[in-house]
Amino acid sequence: MKTRLQKDSWLLTTPIIHRGYITETTPENSLGAFQKAIELGHPIEFDVQMTSDGRLVCVHDDNLKKLTGFDGDVRKTDYETIKKLRLLSTQYSIPDFKEVLDLVNGQVPLLIEVKHQLKDGICEKIVNELKNYKGEFALESFNPTYMKKFKKLAPKFLRGMLGTVVKSGLGFFIDKAMKFLPLNFLVKPDFICYNVKNLPISRLISNNLPIIAWTVTTEEEKIISKKYAVNYIFNNKREL
């Protein structure tokens, strides 16, 4: 399988920061964490979900309790409710997707993870927001149907498949799909983003595609990623 990535692509050469530069005052996936990452010149990995009323927001967890104290699923909550919440008692709220694009504005590349949703429409909304964006970006997901849809809606967008051996809780077949990535022949990804704890992976899985390791948090994992992957996503909470 061939990749469209050039040898000097940021996806292959520049470590990518996980959910922004995280500190006590700049929580993950906050505008503050993204701004700090921009200042340091790091490409940023972040997550996108969709609220009950169809707004795109940048948050990882389905349930918002850990980050905001609000015990509710972001996918079942309207945007106005979400916007009033604060991340870990800081000044920051959960940003919407357009806010992040406006902030970054091409200053650093973006690796955008599309989380699994309870209803349709997220792919179309993401494409609509990105079609006129001038900066560099790539899309990735554990969900191959999303990446296949991006291939149809926006074939020029760079896309990657996420993989892991960790059990998802979604059943045997989903776990096997996340491990072996059997639908890559339909998705035709440009890269594979695989759990560093599960490296190395077989050539049957990688199929000659470049591998990006996620998420590096220790020096040992950094060494593993450099041995078995071309690049890595790292969490700055442990400086590497």
Image: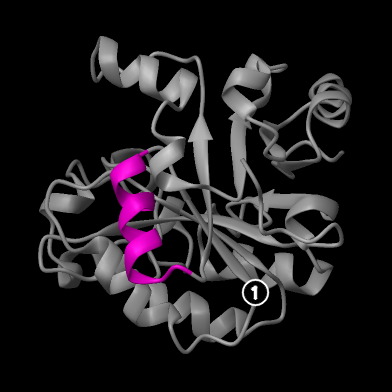
Asked if one can make out residue 168 in the rendered structure from this viewpoint, the answer is: no
What residue appears at the point 78 percent right and 32 percent down from the top-left corner?
A: 229
What residue appears at the point 58 percent right and 23 percent down from the top-left corner?
A: 205
Secondary structure at numbered mark 1? loop
118 up-or-down from 83: above or below: above
- Amino acid type of the residue tagged 1 in the rendering: Glu
Colouring convention used in this rendered image of the protein: one colour
Region rendered in magenta: 143-155
Asked if one can make out residue 127 in the rendered structure from this viewpoint, the answer is: yes
Which SS type dominates the magenta stretch?
helix
Magenta-span inclusion, residue 168: no
Residue 227 locus on image (x, y percent): 88, 25
Judge from the rendering whether residue 175 lies leftward or rightward of residue 206; answer left or right: left
Judge from the rendering whether residue 163 lies leftward or rightward of residue 96; answer left or right: right
31 up-or-down from 85: above or below: below
12 up-or-down from 184: above or below: below
Residue 231 locus on image (x, y percent): 79, 42
Front one among 38 and 70? 38
Front one among 168 and 161? 161
Judge from the rendering whether residue 217 lies leftward or rightward of residue 83; answer left or right: right
Outermost residue toward the top in this view: 172
Residue 98 locus on image (x, y percent): 40, 80
What residue would you read off at disc 1? 136
Give the quadrant of the N terminus.
top right
What residue appears at the point 44 percent right and 38 percent down from the top-left corner?
A: 185
What residue appears at the point 66 percent right and 82 percent down from the top-left corner?
A: 106
